[in-house]
């Protein structure tokens, strides 16, 4: 699975696109790379929400179909999160 660019059509009203960089002192070409995110405020709990768009790499779908797992890693602190699977309705720039 890889992070992909976010098309304009995927940035909802009230949100903004932002590049999130690795922490100071981390190599930006290492394990923690800059990513593009949609940034918004949660109306239900009142905190900032960062959403990153990902796509499956070749072989990922077959691995998941064979009961593979998705691991999500948090660097620094674990925060509340959710994972959404949505149809690809945007034009892919990635």
Image (cartoon, helix red, strand yellow):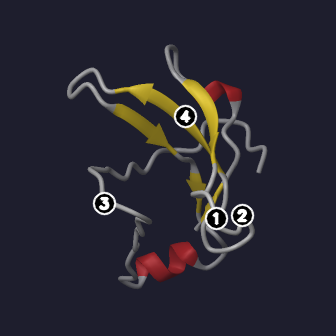
Q: Nearer the viewer, residue 63 or 29?
A: 29
Q: Determine the image quadrant of residue 75.
A: bottom left
Label 3: which residue? Answer: 78
Q: Position of residue 19 (x, y in %)?
A: 66, 41
Decide: is 55 above or below 64.
above
**In the rendered view, does 61 fall on the left or right side of 81?**
right
Callout 4–callout 1 Cβ contact below 8 Å: no
Q: Which residue is mark 2?
A: 28
Local SS, label 2: loop
Q: Residue furthest top?
A: 13
Mark 1 highlights which residue?
Answer: 25
Q: Nearer the viewer, mark 4 or mark 1?
A: 1
Q: Which residue is mark 4?
A: 38
* Cα gap from disc 2 to disc 1, whole angstroms: 9 Å
Whether label 2 touches label 4, CB < 8 Å:
no
For disc 3, the neighbor class at 10 Å (few under 14, some 14 to 19, many from 20) is few
Q: Is residue 37 above or below residue 80?
A: above
Counting residues from the N terminus, which is met first, the one under dot 2 or under dot 4?
A: 2
Sequence order check: which comes first, mark 3 or mark 4?
A: 4
């Amino acid at each position: 699975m890889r992070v992909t660019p976010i098309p304009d059509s995927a940035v909802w009203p009230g949100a903004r696109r932002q590049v999130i960089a690795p922490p100071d002192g981390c190599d930006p070409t290492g394990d923690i790379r800059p990513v593009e995110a949609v940034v918004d405020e949660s109306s239900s709990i009142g905190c900032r929400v960062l959403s990153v768009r990902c796509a499956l790499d070749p072989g990922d779908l077959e691995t998941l179909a064979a009961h593979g797992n998705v691991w999500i890693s948090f660097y620094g602190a674990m925060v509340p999160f959710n994972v959404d699977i949505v149809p690809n309705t945007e034009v892919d720039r990635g």
